[in-house]
Amino acid sequence: MAAVACGFFDGAGSFDTLTLPIKDFDGTTVRTFVAKLDEWSICWVKSRRGLDPVPVVGRFVDGAGT
């Protein structure tokens, strides 16, 4: 297994990749935070199915993601 994570936009975004050679699977997530909207989102891309078309979206309330 190999995993790599990297941030961008001065901490407002990140992406990571995961490779599982035994399962013949690769995946990537892209996370973003829009401070003006106080909203975060996560998108998944999977080697077998491609991009999941609907991101998960939420907010932070009292320091916890919802």
Image (spheres, rainbow, N blue to C red):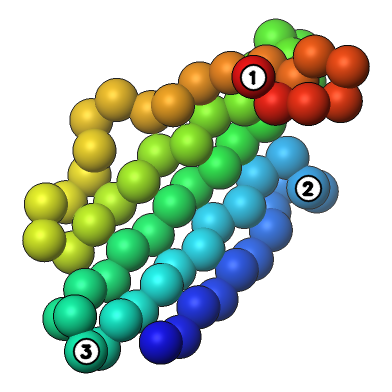
Q: Residues within 10 Å of mark 1 (few under 14, many from 20)?
A: few
Q: Is residue 34 visible?
A: no
Residue under the image location 19 percent in, 80 percent down: 23
Q: Residues within 10 Å of mark 2 (few under 14, many from 20)?
A: few
Amino acid type, residue under disc 2 in the picture: Gly
- Give the Cα distance between marks 1 and 3: 34 Å
Q: Quadrant of residue 60?
A: top right
Query: Which residue is most to the left?
Result: 48
- Which residue in the structure is indicated by mark 1? 66
Q: Amino acid at mark 3?
A: Ile
Residue drawn where x is 64% and y is 19% of the image: 66
The circle on residue 22 is 3
Q: Is residue 17 left or right of residue 37?
A: left
Of the residues under marks 1 and 3, which one precedes in the sequence?
A: 3
- Up-down relation of residue 20 to residue 43 (above or below): below
Disc assigned to residue 11: 2
Residue 5 vertical placement versus 65 (above, below): below
Q: Give me the disc on residue 54.
A: none
Q: Tell how many labels.
A: 3
In front of the other: 23 or 2 = 23
